[in-house]
Image (cartoon, rainbow, N blue to C red):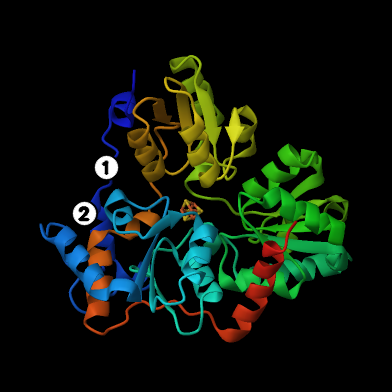
Amino acid sequence: MTTTITETYGVDPTPTPLALLLLGREADPNSERGVECPGDLPPASDPNLVERARAAKATLGDRVFILGHHYQRDEVIEFADVTGDSFKLARDAAARPEAEYIVFCGVHFMAESADILTTAAQQVILPDLAAGCSMADMATAEQVAECWDALADAGIADVTVPVSYMNSSADIKAFTGRHGGTICTSSNAKRALEWAFEQGEKVLFLPDQHLGRNTAVRDMGLSLDDCVVYNPHKPNGGLTAEQLRDAKMILWRGHCSVHGRFSLDSVNDVRARIPGVNVLVHPECKHEVVAAADMVGSTEYIIKALDAAEPGSKWAIGTELNLVRRLAKAHPDKEIVFLDRAVCFCSTMNRIDLPHLVWALESLVEGRVPNVITVDPETEKHAKAALDRMLALP
Ligand code: SF4
């Protein structure tokens, strides 16, 4: 029997475009960044949106390349030339130097990475500048500089190697590059940590504490006691110099506001409801959730695991809801449910909707290049050094 998410939870998980559009139409412009859309943002009720997107894309031809992150809405994914996680998309963009415009259907830090990895002649466009990432925003350049000072005061900065998750701003990637560190993704975090511990004695892991802790404890055999959490909102991160010196993993106090909400209760609950279910979660989930799961991996890993799964097998997936819904549709021969009814879509990923995509494409057709994401040359140089270290990982 195949159970849809709607049947399982009795709710329709279809996103509510009205509320998101109200945000994007400057209902509260002072609390948001970059919500203006010069020209006309088409209403979500326009029955010709699909036709308009098709026509604009066809007019632009090879001049435009549309990237769609796995967590994007179906209506947007339909127009993506490629889909993938943030790093795969940035690499795909770099492999298309003939495309003048890279329309990045994802969030801000991903568009920055694409700008770093593409040529100077290419322009990266984010259809809605308000599509940020709460996790990336949890580590600012000033906060991280203060943290490094605290490590220096504790006498450990010169034996600490920064490792920053791809889900970080270009500034944080540049900090990482300047201090001899590397970037990692959720697919290669273990290799990145192994490399870092060959370079130094300690790792400063930014900005996702859960990915850092899960990788260190689950994959590398470190203990929870080897990890401390640096809270940027407290003096000295809320840690004594001795605690910093004793730690092997200094975890930044950041998290994903979607994955961080899955709970141990939801794992226990789904096991009770669906005997024999396989619980498969993303490593951005809390450690207790990851420890209770059957399998853990990146979005690409989750997709491959379900492709390889036996017909009739049962799965509870702990990652973003847009992706889980698509996977449930793509595998009608398997029972696929969303792990936790209290968790919803990534609201910033959902900012990119069909009206914004149509607006961006039609602007390009009219000769206006909207919402260009540009990383300054100095930041780009150091961020690229950190990204290149990742690419060179064994
Ligand atoms: S799912 Fe989490 S990490 Fe990804 S963009 Fe949304 S808030 Fe950021």
Question: In the image, is the residue at mark 2 within 8 Å of ligand 1 by its beta carbon?
Answer: no
Q: Secondary structure at mark 1?
A: loop
x and y percentages locating residue 124 in the rendered image: 42, 75
Pick the quarter of the image with the C terminus: bottom right
In the visual, does 104 lie left or right of 304? left
Q: Nearer the viewer, residue 203 or 137?
A: 203
Crowdedness of circle 2 by 10 Å Cα count: few (<14), some, many (20+)? few
Task: For the residues labelled 1 and 2, say whether their Cβ atoms are less than 8 Å apart.
Answer: no
Tell me if residue 389 comes above or below residue 135 in the rendering: below
Q: Disc 2 designates what residue? A: 18
Q: Amino acid at mark 1?
A: Thr
Q: Residue at x 59, y 60 (%)?
A: 166
Q: Is residue 348 visible?
A: no
Q: Nearer the viewer, residue 149 or 161?
A: 161
x and y percentages locating residue 182 in the rendered image: 71, 64
x and y percentages locating residue 329 in the rendered image: 32, 35
Query: Mark 1 and mark 2: span between their CA atoms?
Result: 12 Å
Pick the quarter of the image with the N terminus: top left
Tell me if residue 172 comes above or below residue 331 in the rendering: below
Q: Disc 1 designates what residue? A: 14
Q: Is residue 353 visible?
A: yes
In the visual, does 200 lie left or right of 21? right
Q: Amino acid at mark 2?
A: Leu
Tell me if residue 214 comes above or below residue 248 in the rendering: above
Q: Nearer the viewer, residue 81 or 218?
A: 81
